[in-house]
Image (cartoon, rainbow, N blue to C red):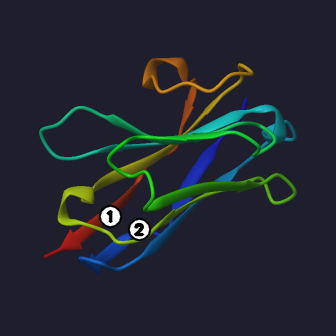
Amino acid sequence: QVQLVESGGGLVQAGGSLRLSCAASGRTFSSYVMGWFRQAPGKEREFVATISWSGGSTYYATSVKGRFTISRDNAKNTVYLQMNSLKPDDTAKYYCAARSKAYLSLSSTEYSYWGQGTQVTVSS
């Protein structure tokens, strides 16, 4: 089992940057596929990015590709989401998630563990 705690959210102007972190407990962090999802008020939770256990494979939602970068440091049990060129449409609560299967997934239902989320607000 793994517990996840996100941090790094906040208020930023459009065009700015933020880096989210997700710290995981447990010795088997390096065996988990990790993902970032977000949910805006009144909207469904949506996929943002995912990364393989080794960090060698990543996949992004079309809306963030080229602006966001997911990475991980298995020695620190942490996954990151670097967000650049932020837009007001990026405003949402961002969640970190983990799945124990080997392949990447864009579906929130395939992730077993979730953090409590961190709020990102982008002003215009």
User: Looking at the rendered structure, which numbered label has been put on residue 12?
Assistant: none
Q: Is residue 116 visible?
A: no
Q: Quadrant of the C terminus?
A: bottom left
Image coordinates for residue 4, horizontal then vertical, percent: 61, 46
Which numbered disc flags the more N-terminal residue, 1 or 2?
A: 2
Q: CA distance from mark 1 to mark 2?
A: 5 Å
Q: Quadrant of the N terminus?
A: top right
Image coordinates for residue 50, horizontal then vertical, percent: 57, 39
| Quadrant housing residue 72 | bottom right
Residue linked to disc 2: 9
Q: Residues within 10 Å of mark 2 (few under 14, many from 20)?
A: some
Type of amino acid under label 2: Gly
Q: Nearer the viewer, residue 16 or 94?
A: 16
Question: Which type of secondary structure does the marked residue at label 2 adopt?
Answer: loop
Q: Is residue 118 left or right of residue 32?
A: left
Residue at the image point whose x is 32% and y is 64% from the top: 120
Q: Is residue 37 visible?
A: yes
Q: Is residue 88 left or right of residue 111?
A: left
State the count of labels.
2
Image coordinates for residue 117, horizontal then vertical, percent: 42, 50
